[in-house]
Amino acid sequence: MSSQPLGIGIIGAGRISRAHASATCALPETRLVGIADVEPERVAQAAEAYGCRGYDGYLPLLADPEVEAVLVGLPHVLHREATVDSLRAGKHVLLEKPMAMSVAECDAMIAAAEASGKTLMVAHSQQFFPVNVAVRRLVQQGGIGHVVMATDTWYKPFHEGVRPAWFLDDSQGGGMWSMNGSHMIDRLCYFLGDEVTAVKAQVGNPIFGLSTDMGIAFLQFRSGVCATIAHAGFREGVVRFEAEITGTEAQLKISGDRSGGTCFWRSRERTWEEVCAPALDLTLRPGMELELPVFAAEIREFALSVREQRPPAVTAEYGRHVVQVLEACLESSRTGREVVL
């Protein structure tokens, strides 16, 4: 196993690239070689900000022998092509969620990874937030008895910051359902350690009439546990980011914001008792600090899986399952019927 930092190239200089670049520079396990984008101004700004190379498009980046692995953070409609090209070029890939536009695209990427022998990991960041890790551990250890049901609720402004044009177009992979529904499906699957087997859902755009701005779904899991998802990108409302898990012996509540918070709550004697989650076990380069260290934990796991030649914590097959559930919810919404996976 090589002890050298993994040489990483970032494909896409959009909003998420800043978190990826900062984390890659901060970790001793990784080295940022360069950033590629089709907009020269964004490439120049990113290269200057992070002291790395800039590439006009990702093909020159893939031709750079110092780039051993890539982080793909493009509009969702471009995931399949960029990922397949990267794998065929002999690069390991960490791909932003959702994995693709369809299960068929996921299958094409999985086939390319198998043919290349390279690692393909999907960046479901919810699995690296300390609170979520602690909640999953407690649930899996039987800390609330047998799980009975779960809910996940997320309300936020639709126009949070400046939305790129592709986000307003469902055909480009935009919309709240693709962007955040994937987080919520992942979070429930992660907490429960289970797979979805059937869904009944309503997904649409009744608030703004643009890309999807709401989704509500009833999920049946393989174990028999049921869960609900409620998500909306509102015009006017109050932000809420909360999940609850009910077991035969206790309840858990996870309530926070995009940073994930530091605590969750466990029921005890019919009131909520605060439980603080252990901090991330991360070593950064001297003098480096991160606003959202969760991305460093995610990238570190990717780099270690490559160096140790083992499957990553979030496999491509798992990412495919999340896309399959997203698709099934859309199909249920179109037909008004339950969809069995």
Image (cartoon, rainbow, N blue to C red):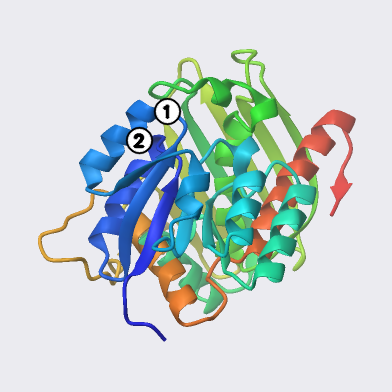
Residue 162 in view: yes
Vertical placement of 46 versus 183: above or below? above
Label 2 element class: helix
Residue 262 in view: no
Q: Are marks 1 and 2 in contact (CB under 8 Å)?
A: yes
Quarter of the picture holding the N terminus: bottom left
Label 1 element class: loop
According to the image, label 2 marks what residue? Answer: 43
Q: Looking at this view, is 253 or 65 the one in front?
A: 65
Q: Quadrant of residue 25?
A: bottom left
Q: Position of residue 109 (x, y in %)?
A: 69, 56
What whole-number distance in Å separates the C-alpha atoms at marks 1 and 2?
Answer: 6 Å
Vertical placement of 140 versus 21: above or below? below
Q: Which mark is residue 282?
A: none
| Left or right of 255 in this view: 331 | right
Vertical placement of 139 versus 42: above or below? below
Crowding around mark 2 (Cα neighbors within 10 Å: few <14, some 14 to 19, many 20+) is many
**Three-letter amino acid code of the residue under disc 1:** Glu
**Three-letter amino acid code of the residue under disc 2:** Val
Q: Looking at this view, is 48 or 158 the one in front?
A: 48
Residue at (37%, 55%) from the top-left corner? 295
Q: Quadrant of residue 277?
A: bottom left
Q: Position of residue 181 (x, y in %)?
A: 60, 41
According to the image, label 1 marks what residue? Answer: 39
Q: Looking at this view, is 220 or 9 the one in front?
A: 9
Residue at (64%, 25%) from the top-left corner? 212
Residue at (77%, 65%) from the top-left corner? 222
| Left or right of 68 in this view: 90 | right
| Left or right of 91 in this view: 44 | left
Quarter of the picture holding the C terminus: bottom right
Q: Position of residue 67 (x, y in %)?
A: 42, 60
Q: Position of residue 39 (x, y in %)?
A: 42, 28
